[in-house]
Amino acid sequence: MAIEPRLNDNGTLNLSKLPDTQIVAGLLATRVKMFNEAAQLRERTDGIKKDIAAIDRVLDAVGYSGELDAIMPRRAPLRVFEQGELTRLTLEVLRRSGPLTAGSIAFAHLVARGEDTEDRKALKAMTDRVSRFLRRERSKGRVVAQNGEGKALLWSIKPPRVASNQPTNAIPEP
């Protein structure tokens, strides 16, 4: 026997009347649908970028010498993170995992956001974003960097300062 969803007076679904299994199943189905839709949008975007590159090659072949970027409409900068999200996610990763490279932190962000970790451009863009954030945080004294393998820096949260008037190994008296 199926339970018919009931709507509240304002037209929203009354979840209290549905068994938890139906709610979970519905949410999972919606999640899968949205994930597939995002993948289709990425594929379509990749196709459009290839088409634009082909048009640019044809323009070049016919001798167009104008500045292509100058005729493009301005667009709002892409907002990848919500307010404070990059800070929260980065510091959370560093607290859990200890010293990491910006690339490793960026990879963790892509995983947490459910994005394609095989997309090299996305990983590089995220690594650049994380690197800029970490450099800003270092200038504020919140994180520290130490030399890692090759040119890579290993980033970690700056340890809290111990008050100079209290010994670090003191045992409190009863």
Image (cartoon, rainbow, N blue to C red):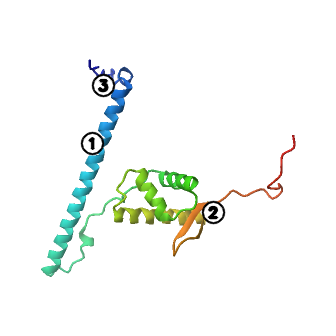
Q: Nearer the viewer, residue 74 or 163?
A: 163
On the image, the x and y values in percent for residue 148 come to 55, 71
Q: Amino acid at mark 1?
A: Lys
**Mark 3 or mark 2, which is nearer to you?**
2
Sequence-earlier tag: 3 or 1: 3
Q: Quadrant of the C terminus?
A: top right
Q: Residue furthest top?
A: 1
Q: Residue at x 51, y 65 (%)?
A: 101
Left or right: where does residue 50 sit relative to residue 128? left
Quadrant of the image occupied by residue 21: top left
| Mark 3 element type | loop
Q: Is 106 situated above or below 54?
A: above
Sequence-earlier tag: 3 or 2: 3
Residue on which disc 2 sits: 141
Q: Residue at x 45, y 56 (%)?
A: 108
Q: Which mark is residue 53?
A: none
Q: Amino acid at mark 3?
A: Gly
Check disc 2: other Cα within 10 Å, few if <14, some if 14-19, many if 20+.
few
Residue on which disc 1 sits: 33
Residue on which disc 3 sits: 11
Q: Nearer the viewer, residue 146 or 88?
A: 146
Q: Amino acid at mark 2?
A: Gly
- Give the Cα distance between marks 3 and 1: 23 Å
- Give the Cα distance between marks 2 and 1: 43 Å
- Give the Cα distance between marks 3 and 2: 51 Å
